[in-house]
Amino acid sequence: MSIEVGSRAPDFTLPDQYGDPLTLSEAVADRHALLVFFPFAFSSICTGELLEVQLSIDEFANERVQVHAVSCDPVPALKTWAAIEGYRFPLLSDFWPHGEVSRAYGVLDEASGTAARGTFLVAPDLTVRWSLVHGEAETRPIGLLHEAVRELSGPTPS
């Protein structure tokens, strides 16, 4: 079961696609984090979803929010995929200990060892403000991510 809105988000440190560590509590110090868990790099649904995020990057990476995509793929796979697709946001590797962060958020599919399509909007105080969880084969409705981010207080980015 995924973590609920209003609960404290589990803090974590994961390497990004370049191997640089990212700690959630530091990332949310000055803005919200939109955590987008996904099953597989290079898969068609995941590529399509993250392309939708990339196409709206100004909405998902600004002074109010920063998107972070998370999968159980290893760092080299995420680095290659990000380079091929042109993603301009962090892709975080939950590879080792395998799926530990995905498990903490309640989105790890233990049978396949992959993350479900979980999305969590985490406030600077580490409170989960919004969440959405779909299965591996279900496409995440990108419009709902837009709505969640637009509801944040503060000016709309230009």
Image: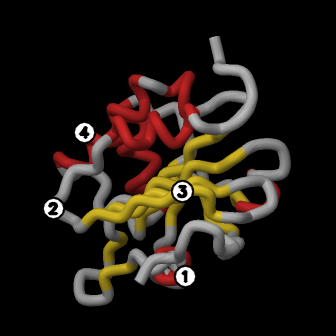
Determine whether the residue tagged by mark 2 lies in a helix, strand or loop.
loop
CA gap between label 1 and label 2 equals: 21 Å
Indicate the position of residue 63 as horizontal and vertical percent values.
74, 30
- x 65%, y 38%: residue: 152
Numbered circle sitting on residue 48: 4
Bin the neighbour count of mark 2 within 10 Å (Cα to Cα): few under 14, some 14-19, many 20 and up: few
Numbered circle sitting on residue 130: 3
Front residue (pair 149, 100): 149
Indicate the position of residue 25 as horizontal and vertical percent values.
78, 62
State whether residue 79 is above or below residue 38. above
- x 38%, y 55%: residue: 77
Its colouring scheme is secondary structure
CA gap between label 1 and label 3 equals: 16 Å
- Read off the residue under disc 1: 104
State whether residue 101 is above or below residue 132. below
Numbered circle sitting on residue 137: 2
State whether residue 89 is above or below residue 17. above
Front residue (pair 138, 81): 138
| Disc with the residue nearer the chain's start (2 vs 3) | 3
CA gap between label 4 and label 1 equals: 26 Å
